[in-house]
Image (cartoon, rainbow, N blue to C red):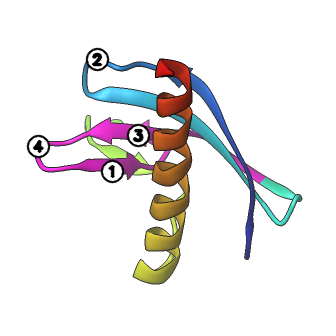
Amino acid sequence: MEITDIQFRHLNEEGRLRALVSVTFDRTFAVHDIKVIDGPERLFLAMPSRRMPDGRYRDIVHPVGSEMREKLEQAVLKEYRQTVESRNG
C-alpha cells in the first residue's frame, strides 16, 4: 500500500495540535482527520478516533503493525516539516 497524497487541512504552529491531515493510499482510499501532535519528546501522529460511551477514545482506523505506522508517520511528518518551512520562508 503506497501513500499517494498528503493534504493538510489545518496547520497551527502553537499548541499541541499542529495539523489535521488527510492521507490517500493507492489513489483509492482516503483517511481524514489524522492529527499531528506536539508531544513531550517529539511530533507524532494520532489516528482518527471516536469517544466511547465509557468516555475512553478508540481509534476508528489505524495501521496494523509497526512497519506501516512508521512509514505513515515518516511520510506525514516529512511533508509537515516541508510545508511549515515553506510557509515561514
The residue wearing badge 2 is 14
Q: Residues within 10 Å of mark 2 (few under 14, many from 20)?
A: few
Q: Amino acid at mark 4?
A: Pro
> Does the residue at mark 4 contact the one at mark 3 (Cβ under 8 Å)?
no
Q: Residues within 10 Å of mark 1 (few under 14, many from 20)?
A: some
Pick the residue in front: 23 or 84: 84
Mark number for residue 59?
none
Q: CA distance from mark 4 to mark 3?
A: 13 Å
Circle 4 SS class:
loop
Residue plotted at (34% across, 36% down): 53
Q: CA distance from mark 1 to mark 2?
A: 15 Å
The residue wearing badge 1 is 44
Mark number for residue 36?
3
Q: Amino acid at mark 3?
A: Val
Q: Main secondary structure of the magenta part?
A: strand
Query: Which of marks 3 and 1 precedes in the sequence?
Result: 3
Residue 32 point in image, percent of width and height: 64, 40
Residue 8 point in image, percent of width and height: 61, 32
